[in-house]
Image (cartoon, rainbow, N blue to C red):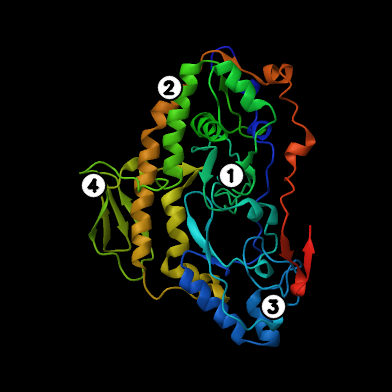
Amino acid sequence: MPGVTHDEAPLLGDLMPWSVAPLRPGRGWPMGPDSASLKARWDTLVRERGPAREALFGTTRARTPHAAVGQLPGHPGGTGRLARESGPCPEPVRILHGPFDEQWLIPDHRLIDVARPELWRVAGEGQLFAVEQGYVPGAAGPAVLASSVLPDGRSPAGRPGRIRPLFRRPGGLEPNVAPGLLDHLSGVLGHQVTARALLAWVLATGAGSAAGCRVPLTSDGDVWARGVDLGGRLLRLHLRGDGERPKLPGGRRPYVRAPLPARPASLSYDAEEQILWVGDEGVISPVPREAWEFEVSGVRIIERWFAPRTAGAAAEAGGLAAIGPAAWPQTWTSELLELITVLALIAELGPAQEELTASLGAPITGNELRRAGVLPVPDAARRPASVLDHHEEGPDGQFALL
């Protein structure tokens, strides 16, 4: 980066100052890759009584079946003591369980040790989340991922990152951006810069460091436009097409060449033939090497995605988590094909990202942002906005206006 060192590039934590730590579920069974299994686990739990229910639940210091907690914002889950619960399972919702792995979660506050209600309050239409990955020195993969569903912030390498909503209020209102930053960039670049454009730029140029993700900024309008266009393509891929399913060109699209077994227990890759073996007999091809080797924080994503869906994973977990589908669902095959496609397309953009970061032109450093009054960020910008203009049900059905 000519004229500026990596350490002089602003931190993402200053550009998007409000962040939330990852969720802490406390127990594995309320989340999984199959929503029907979650409902079966709930039904099994509420059929039991007393100590048997408590044993299945998985008591922690934060949650027992007798704990009194408020409603999870935006969801009608019960607030009575779980020890007395007999109703149907709350409808599972999509959640991003680590990089590129959308799973299901029972949205009931009584089941989650630390649910981060401030995130749930701003989730929904118009919201996007930037998920900063835990830094692993020398590891490959993007430093920041984007999601339109609420992420749990899980890091594949076990080092927690941070979750940064793009907006501080529901409905895509009030950008979570350092006050004055968008106006400053707009003035320097000569055209309006939006919060979504800034997120696209972050995806295209952000790089991990021990201090956190650093984001080099440029004062060159043409370079900025190129970066935002590139980041926009990355953003659409992170969001699984953002309304239009991503596709590789004909002849390169992965297909199921031999049916996947009902309960596959292994995954392997033949680089020469570009074959992904699912179990002993299932064949998906062609699978680009770049997709198979795609990593985040040094962990291969396809292998990580497959692990909780193997025949032995649920059995090893025991308890309610052992309840899973009797056979590999067709939806998982579709999700795997889409994952391969997304990772391959992101990998193809890697050279363009390297070219962009090598030719940023005149940089905007942290010192310049300090002279402009954008930094340091005021403390209020690092805290959640007050969005509670409605009632939320508290423990045991009590209402409080917060």
Residue type, numbered disc 1: Gly
Residue plotted at (50% across, 33% down): 200
Residue 153: x %, y % from top left: 60, 50
Comparing marks 3 and 2, which lies closer to the viewer? 3
Give amino acid for label 3.
Leu
Among the 4 quarters of the image, the one containing residue 208: top right
Q: Nearer the viewer, mark 4 or mark 2?
A: 2
Residue marked by disc 4:
273
Q: Report how many numbered discs are placed on residues in the image.
A: 4
- The type of residue carrying mark 4 is Glu
Q: Secondary structure at mark 2?
A: helix
Q: Residues within 10 Å of mark 1 (few under 14, many from 20)?
A: some
Disc 3 designates what residue? Answer: 82
For badge 2, the amino acid type reads Glu
Give the mark nearer the N terminus: 4 vs 3: 3
Residue 380 image position (x, y, % from top left): 78, 38
Residue at 68 percent across and 49 percent down: it is 21
Mark 2 vs mark 1: give the one in front.
1
Task: Pick the residue in front: 218 or 188.
Answer: 188
Residue 140 visible within the image: yes
Q: Is residue 263 left or right of residue 70?
A: left
Badge 4 or badge 1: first in the primary sequence: 1
Q: Nearer the viewer, residue 157 or 190?
A: 190
Residue that carries the numbered disc 2 in the rendered image: 355
Q: Nearer the viewer, mark 3 or mark 1?
A: 1
Mark 3 → mark 1, Cα distance in angstroms: 34 Å
Up-down relation of residue 39 to residue 2 (above or below): below
Residue of label 1: 172
| Circle 3 crowding by C-alpha within 10 Å: few under 14, some 14–19, many from 20 | many
- Is there a contact, CB below 8 Å, between mark 4 and mark 3? no
